[in-house]
C-alpha cells in the first residue's frame, strides 16, 4: 500500500470518527446526489480535500434492533442472492463485506477494492404512506420472487425504514462498462489488465469465502491502472452468520463471480477496439451460458433454476482457465492465479511483487 493511501485512510477515518451524526447529515445534505435506488442513495463529496463516494443504505427497523447482525434476519430465500432484481439481504451484511475488503487491502492481501473510510447511522426522512401503485409494485415483485412473503416483508421494511447506514468509500473515477466499451482503451495492456484482474480478484474472493453475486460492469470500477470490485449489497460470506441452507447455497455457486465477470467484459456488440472484440470472442461461450441461466432464472416462477457450476467449469477450462476449486485447496490462494493468456501480464507483475498494492490514492 502506498504512503498516500495509508495517510488518506488515517486522515479521513479520524475526521469521520470526530463528526457528530448531525454534522454527517448536514454534509450529506449539501452533497451532489449521483444515484438513487430502492436500497438507498449515493452522493459525491470531499473530506480533507479527498473525493469520497458516500452511499446511504436503508436500515430497516428489524436491522436497527439487531445492530451489526449478519444473520438472514428476514429469512429470505437463498435465490434472492442473485442479481436479477434483488434488493439484497441487509445493510449490516453490506457494511461487513466492505469492512472485510478494506482489511484485505490494508493488510496487503488484495488491492482490488475501494477503501471504506468509515460509516455512520443517520435518521432517514419519514417515508410517505404507500399508495395503490406501491402496493401493485410489491404484489408484482413478490410474485416474481416465487410468491415469497419474506421478500415482500423485506421490501416493505425498506420502504418504512427510519434510518440509513452511510458508508464512506474511496471514490473511483469510472465504471468498467464506460471504460472498456469506449474508444479510450489504450491497446492490449489495458484489456489484459482487466481480464487478468477479474480472474485474480474473483479467485481471491472465493478463497476468502465470499461471493459478490453482482459483479457487472456498473459495479466493477477502474482508474485505468487497475479494477475495483465495489457495491457489496448482494454479497455473502462464510464469515457471516449463515444458516446451513445458505452455506450449501454458497458451495453450489462457487465460480459464479468468475462467470459473471467474464460475461460482463465479453459484450461483442459493444466492442470499439480489436482487443476488446478479441476478448469478447474468447469468452463467448461463457457469456452465452451465463445469459441463458439468467434468462431461465428470470422466467422461472419459483426461482429454483440452479447455477450451472459444472458447465461453467468446463467452459472456463476450454478458454484456458483453471477454476479456483480445481487449482488449489479451499482456503488457500495464490494472488495471481495463472492462465495461459495472462502469463505475460502476471510475469510483469511478479517482477515488482513488493509493489503489488502501490496504487494511486
Image: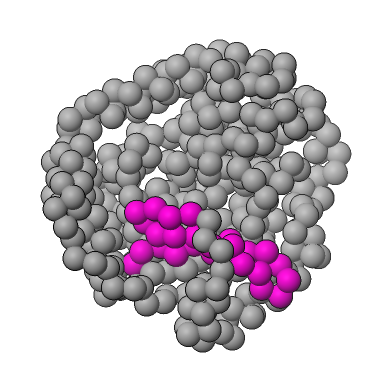
Would residue 312 be seen by someone viewing this image from the given angle?
Answer: yes
Name the spot of residue 212 as percent of width and height, x first.
46, 44
Q: Is residue 312 above or below residue 175?
A: above
Name the spot of residue 120 as percent of width and height, x first.
47, 75
- List the single residue furthest toward the front: 132
Q: Is residue 168 above or below residue 133?
A: below
Name the spot of residue 258 as percent of width and height, x first.
52, 32
Q: Nearer the viewer, residue 361 or 108?
A: 361
Q: Nearer the viewer, residue 201 or 138?
A: 138
Q: Nearer the viewer, residue 355 or 217?
A: 217
Q: Which residue is at 72% across, 28% downward?
A: 183
Q: Is residue 324 above or below residue 173?
A: above
Which corner quadrant of the image does residue 307 belong to? top left
Q: Nearer the viewer, residue 123 or 361?
A: 123
Q: Is residue 309 left or right of residue 350?
A: left
Name the spot of residue 279 as percent of width and height, x first.
64, 20
| Image quadrant containing the N terminus | bottom right
| Image quadrant containing the C terminus | bottom right
Prevalent SS, magenta region: strand
Would residue 204 be seen by someone viewing this image from the given angle?
Answer: no
Colouring style: one colour
Q: Which residue is at 34% across, 59% downward?
A: 90
Q: Which residue is at 58% across, 18% downward?
A: 268
Q: Is residue 32 left or right of residue 195?
A: left
Q: Is residue 152 left or right of residue 87?
A: left
Is 312 contained in the magenta span? no
Is 50 contained in the magenta span? yes
Q: Which residue is at 74% across, 41% downward?
A: 224
The total number of labels drawn is 0
Q: Which residues are magenta?
A: 35-59
Amino acid at each position: 500500500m502506498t504512503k498516500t493511501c495509508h495517510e488518506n485512510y488515517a486522515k479521513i477515518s479520524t475526521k469521520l470518527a470526530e463528526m457528530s451524526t448531525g454534522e454527517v447529515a448536514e454534509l450529506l445534505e449539501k452533497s451532489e446526489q449521483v444515484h438513487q435506488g430502492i436500497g438507498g442513495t449515493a452522493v459525491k463529496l470531499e473530506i480533507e480535500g479527498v473525493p469520497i463516494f458516500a452511499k446511504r443504505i436503508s436500515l430497516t427497523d428489524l436491522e436497527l434492533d439487531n445492530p451489526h447482525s449478519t444473520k438472514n434476519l428476514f429469512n429470505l430465500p437463498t435465490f434472492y442472492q442473485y442479481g436479477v432484481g434483488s434488493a439484497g439481504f441487509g445493510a449490516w451484511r453490506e457494511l461487513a463485506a466492505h469492512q472485510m475488503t478494506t482489511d484485505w487491502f490494508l493488510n496487503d492481501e488484495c488491492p482490488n477494492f475501494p477503501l471504506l473510510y468509515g460509516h455512520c447511522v443517520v435518521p432517514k426522512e419519514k417515508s410517505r404512506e404507500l399508495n395503490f401503485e406501491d402496493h401493485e409494485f410489491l404484489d408484482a415483485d413478490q410474485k416474481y420472487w416465487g410468491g415469497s412473503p419474506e421478500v415482500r416483508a423485506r421490501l416493505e421494511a425498506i420502504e418504512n425504514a427510519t434510518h440509513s447506514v452511510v458508508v464512506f468509500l474511496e471514490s473511483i473515477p469510472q465504471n468498467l462498462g464506460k471504460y472498456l466499451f469506449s474508444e479510450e482503451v489504450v491497446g492490449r495492456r489495458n484489456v489484459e489488465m482487466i481480464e487478468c484482474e477479474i480472474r485474480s480478484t474473483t479467485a481471491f474472493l472465493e478463497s476468502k469465502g465470499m461471493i459478490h453475486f453482482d459483479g457487472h460492469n456498473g459495479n466493477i470500477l477502474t482508474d485505468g491502472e487497475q479494477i475495483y470490485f465495489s457495491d457489496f449489497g448482494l454479497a455473502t460470506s462464510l464469515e457471516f452468520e449463515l444458516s446451513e441452507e445458505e452455506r450449501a447455497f454458497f458451495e453450489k455457486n462457487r465460480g459464479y463471480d468468475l462467470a459473471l465477470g467474464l460475461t460482463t467484459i465479453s459484450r461483442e456488440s459493444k466492442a470499439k477496439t480489436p482487443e476488446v472484440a478479441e476478448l469478447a470472442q474468447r469468452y463467448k461461450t461463457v457469456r452465452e451460458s451465463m445469459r441463458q441461466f439468467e434468462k431461465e432464472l428470470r422466467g422461472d416462477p419459483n426461482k429454483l433454476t440452479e447455477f450451472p457450476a459444472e458447465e461453467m467449469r468446463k467452459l472456463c477450462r476450454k478458454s484456458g482457465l483453471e477454476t479456483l476449486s480445481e487449482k488449489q485447496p479451499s482456503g488457500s490462494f495464490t494472488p495471481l492465479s495463472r492462465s495461459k493468456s495472462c502469463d505475460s501480464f502476471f510475469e510483469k507483475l511478479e517482477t515488482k511483487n513488493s509493489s503489488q498494492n502501490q496504487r494511486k490514492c
